[in-house]
Image: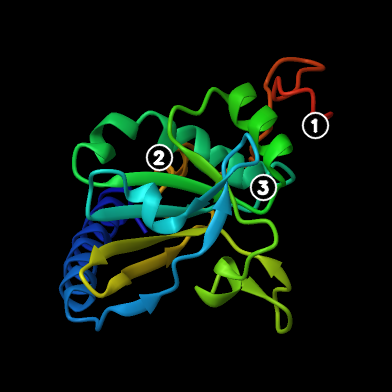
Amino acid sequence: MTTTTAHDAVMDLERQIMELKQQRTKLRQELKPEPVKDYELKRTDGSVVKLSELFGDKDEMILVHNMGQSCVYCTLWADGLNGLTDHLTDRAAFVLTSPDEPQTLKAFSEGRKWRYPVASIEGTTLAHDLGFHSDSGDHVGYMPGASALKKTASGIVRTGSTFFGPGDDFCAIWPLNDLLPAKEWAPKYSYKAGGSCGSGCGCN
């Protein structure tokens, strides 16, 4: 395949991908909202906070399902989303949840300098109930992603959800890396020799 032919093929695929994304967005609008329980989570100081309280003065919320400080990929997504905080919260509440206990979550999120609210789901069934934790199958344990929630007069509902994974739309580094010649790459907590996340958790 010549360079010109390959370029045309890439452009054609990009057009198809954009069209498929538009179709996906349209189908998502047709999904029936799912009821969600008003879970009791924990703030980083250990105090209890209800899911409904995390909406603040908004009636919509983007809830990120993070796997915790042990996952460097989840950390990569969370770091990238940090820069979108002001834009996202102009419309909806934006909260990251983690299975880490509150003290660990506090140290890690502050070490990463995350600017958005975080909450611990330790001891709750939130991740399992919303499909982001599995006890069997190909993947056992927590899975990363996001849920879109809405607060209504009758309670909380989920209007959409998605999983995170290498190459997805939720971390700009994947499509940018794809523009470079093929090469294996994986994220790190720190790109300084001997560095860590800065939270004192011992990662490197």
Is 175 left or right of 45, judged from the image as shown?
left
- Comes first in the chain, label 3 or label 1: 3
Query: Residue drawn at (60%, 39%), measured in percent from left and top?
Result: 75
- Comes first in the chain, label 1 or label 2: 2
Q: Which residue is mark 3?
A: 68
Q: Which residue is mark 1?
A: 203
- Mark 1 surroundings within 10 Å by alpha-carbon count, few (fewer than 14), some (14 through 19), many (20 or more): some
Q: Which residue is mark 2?
A: 172
Image depth: mark 1 or mark 2 in front: 1
Horizontal and vertical percent for residue 40? 54, 59
Horizontal and vertical percent for residue 100? 70, 48
Q: Quadrant of the C terminus?
A: top right
Foreground residue among 32 and 22 = 32
- Mark 2 surroundings within 10 Å by alpha-carbon count, few (fewer than 14), some (14 through 19), many (20 or more): few
Separation of marks 1 and 2 at Cα, in angstroms: 23 Å
Give, as a three-letter code, the residue at label 2. Answer: Ala
Q: Quadrant of the N terminus?
A: bottom left
Helix, strand or loop for disc 3:
loop
